[in-house]
Each structure stands twice: as structure tokens, then as C-alpha cells.
Amino acid sequence: MSEPKRWYQYVGVRAALIGAVGLIIVAGMNICYNRSRLAQNNEQYKTEIDTLKQNLSKKDFEIQRLETQLAPFKTIALDKYTGSEQERLQKLAERIEGLENPLKKIIASATANVEVTIESDEEVSTRYMNEGGFLSFVKNRQSLLLTSDTQSNAKQSGKGEVVYKGVFYMQADHSAVGEPIEMLQKSDIIQMMFRKIPENSQVLGGKAAIIINGDTRFEFEILPQQMRGNNIIIQDVKSKFLTHRSGEL
């Protein structure tokens, strides 16, 4: 009875060893698989880190480039404006915006140069000292900006036409002072008048230019028209804004 028992014991031990070896192999395979996945993940993470480093390097370069470009503007801001550095840069930015978009500028002064040609055989070449005129931007029959003067000029062209010219000025205490230029685009019409032009004259054409703050110019064409009384009119003001900008920081 002892030999069969030993044989069974041997078989049992062998089976246990085979099972243990199998478990070890499976565990080893899992370890190898996990190590492989870990290596792949590490490689992916390394690639992502390298990409982030490259992006960070590009951002640093971009910041340096922007700082280099900003340096001359910062110098201008610190030299010309008061307040903190941020406040000075903000003031410069507003100034630049005004140069880029003249309609954002604040009105401080205004001058109008007006030239009107009418049909007339009158022989005249005169500077009128007390017979000037005006130019006004009008909204709902209310003047948004008025320029005027007591002087004007008239001259026969020799072709049955008389050319009238005037330079008109806005008063320093006018309500338009402190308003943005873009306010003028709300006008329904531009109304002009020369005291020496006869009522109901036939206007052959002309031009008007309004110069704001001495450096921002807007030009308008005066189309042929039959005057109503002593008024000369430019209509559809907004679409006729032609800007010529200049200025310094």
C-alpha cells in the first residue's frame, strides 16, 4: 500500500508544481505586458512633455518679440503722458485709436472752408468785410456744429459764373466742444449760407471741407441745385464723409 500512496503523492506534488509554474508564467506575462504599456505611456508622456516645452519656448519667443515691439511705444508713453505705466500706455492706445479712427476724436476746434459757384453775370471781384456766412451740421432742424464768419469773397469767372468763398470758424464755447467727431455723422444735412449770394440762385457746384482740431479733415461735394431762399444744402451726410487723417503720437 505504500507504493501507490507515494505515486499519488508524487502526482499531486507534480500537479502543484505545474500549477505554480503556470501562475508564475501568467504573472510574468502580465508584468511584461504592464511594463510594455508603461513604457508606451512613458514614451507618450515624454512626447507630450517635449511638445509642451516647444510650445512654451514659442510662447516665450512671442512674448519677447511683443515686448521688443512694444518698447518704443512704452518710451513714447512714459515721455508724453502722466500716471502709472499702465495708465500711460492706455492713454497712448487711445491716442493711436484716434489716429486710426478719426471719428473717435474729441472736438476742440472746427474750421470750414466753403466754395460755391453760382450762375451769374454779375461783374464782381470783392472781399466782403461784413457779409460773411455760415456752415452748419443740422439734425432735426437743430445745429450740431456751427461755423461762421463775417467775411467772404466773390469773383466772376468770366464764364457767367460767380465763385463765392468763405472760411468759417466754430466758437470756442459751442456745445459741440467735447463731443466725438462721429456725432456729426448723425446730421440730416449740412446747411450753408453766403449773405451776398442772391436768394433762389442756381448753384452749379462747389465743395466744403471741415477741419477738426487742425489735423482731421472731412470733405463734401456741393451738388448742383436750385437754392430755396438763401440756403445751400448737402444731403446724405454720413455716406459723403471722406476722411484725410494726419497727426503725431
Image: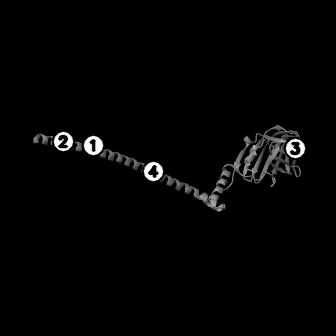
- The residue that disc 3 covers is 197
Q: Is residue 232 left or right of residue 242?
A: right
Q: Residue at x 64, y 56 (%)?
A: 90
Name the mark nearer the viewer: 2 or 4.
2
- The residue that disc 1 covers is 26
- The residue that disc 4 covers is 52
Determine the CA span between mark 3 and mark 1: 111 Å
Name the mark nearer the viewer: 3 or 4.
4
Instruction: Work out whether mark 1 precedes mark 2 in sequence or the reverse, and give the earlier one.
Output: 2
Q: Secondary structure at mark 2?
A: helix
Amino acid under disc 2: Gly
Instruction: Work out whether mark 3 precedes mark 2 in sequence or the reverse, and give the earlier one.
Output: 2
Instruction: Work out whether mark 3 precedes mark 1 in sequence or the reverse, and give the earlier one.
Output: 1
- Of the pair 169 and 98, the residue shown nearer to us: 98
Q: Secondary structure at mark 4?
A: helix
- Of the pair 4 and 169, the residue shown nearer to us: 4
Q: Position of residue 111 (x, y in %)?
A: 78, 51
Q: Residue at x 84, y 46 (%)?
A: 164
Name the mark nearer the viewer: 3 or 2.
2
Q: Position of residue 239 (x, y in %)?
A: 73, 40
Q: Secondary structure at mark 1?
A: helix
- Mark 1 crowdedness (10 Å alpha carbons): few <14, some 14-19, many ≥20: few
Name the quadrant of the C terminus: bottom right
- Of the pair 106 and 42, the residue shown nearer to us: 42
Determine the CA span between mark 3 and mark 4: 76 Å
- Report the disc number at residue 12: 2
- Mark 4 crowdedness (10 Å alpha carbons): few <14, some 14-19, many ≥20: few
Name the quadrant of the N terminus: top left
Amino acid under disc 3: Ile
